[in-house]
Amino acid sequence: MRPFSFQRKGAIIRTLKEPVIKKKKFNLDRVLYLALILLVLGFLLRYVYKKLAIIEGDGQIQMEKVDVNFTQDIRLLGIKITEGDTVSRDQLLFHYKESVFDNDASAILRERKAKEDRLQDVQKLAFEIQQKKLKLKAQVEKRNYLRNTKDRFEKFVLLDVYTKEKLDEVTQQLNEAEITTELLRNEIQLLLKLKKMNFSDTSSDTQREGKNNYRNNYLSPINGVIGQILKNEQEACYKTENVMTIHNTDVVFIKAYFDLKDINDIKQGQEVKVLFPDQSTTKGRIRKIYIATYESPDEFQKTYEPTERNILAEIIPINDMEKTQWASYHKLNVKIQLGKI
């Protein structure tokens, strides 16, 4: 029998190794392209939204200003505050002295006129006192007559000659006469005191000649912030000249300027968004819209272009607690935004 043997050759069927799939590299150009498209699209959407849905204007924060001046010449003696100080009502701001800076002739004429005015006042008071005395005399006679009439009517009422209503009418007239008499006496006493005071002033005019300087204290009329101080100590300040300015922190508002094309979308009482220079925001409300159009300040005008006229509105804080924050941006420019929708 022929012997059987296995072949010792290698196997014909062999397994093949699968090829390794290389991972795709990160495509930076594609990402940058997509990011650029999204960025441009975002800017376009933001621009369209601001143009169609938001009205934007320029504004300037202002406070009510009080100018400190006098109707006569003064000289400052001592200033107790500096620019930028916060002051309260009735706080001492400075001392001053009323001074006469005219020549001697005008001073004499002024004193003479004051003396003549006081003499005229005394004469007027004397005439008025005399008139009051005549009225008082007539009123006393009327009162005495009504007293006698009342006594007589009381007897007639008891005898049923007159009714009680007639007696009540006379009693009421008597009470009115009593009150009028007392009032006239009080008025005469007051006029006599005034006459005595004016007469004393007139008789002492000679002693007061040359004494035309008086020391006074000036107290702040409002709560506010000291603005410019225009005079120094010991400096003369002539009438109508300003000594300083005080900004009222209780009255803070924004003067806002909008384009004329937005006139139909701006309403009184509308709520707005205020953007401060430090990027902080707050809410405000349109208090008033001016009827006429106004030129906006130079900083809001476009360079090398014709001057534009704008709608002017006043904006106040919604919350009174924010007045202090607004006051800290005094005279600074802000952006105003309000929605059309």
Image (tube, rainbow, N blue to C red):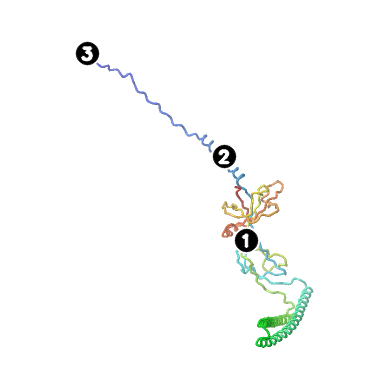
Q: Which residue is mark 1?
A: 251
Q: Which residue is mark 2?
A: 41
Q: Residue 283 placed where, x, y %? A: 58, 54
Query: Is residue 73 placed above or below 173 in the rendered structure?
Result: above
Q: Disc 2 and disc 3: Cα gap in Å?
A: 87 Å
Q: Which residue is mark 3?
A: 3
Q: Circle 2 sits in a helix, a strand or a loop, which is it?
A: helix
Identify residue type, mark 2. Answer: Leu
Query: Is residue 272 placed above or below 196 in the rendered structure?
Result: above
Identify residue type, mark 3. Answer: Pro
Q: Circle 1 sits in a helix, a strand or a loop, which is it?
A: strand
Q: Disc 2 and disc 1: Cα gap in Å?
A: 44 Å
**Could you tell me if the residues under marks 2 and 1 are in contact, i.e. CB atoms within 8 Å?**
no
Sequence order check, earlier mark of 2 and 3: 3
Query: Is residue 46 placed above or below 22 in the rendered structure?
Result: below
Q: Is residue 198 visible?
A: yes
Looking at the rendered image, the quarter that the N terminus falls into is top left
2 vs 3, front mark: 2
Q: Residue 156 placed where, x, y %? A: 68, 87
Q: Is residue 182 visible?
A: no
Q: Residue 237 placed where, x, y %? A: 71, 67
Q: Residue at x 67, y 68 (%)?
A: 233
The quadrant where residue 181 appears = bottom right
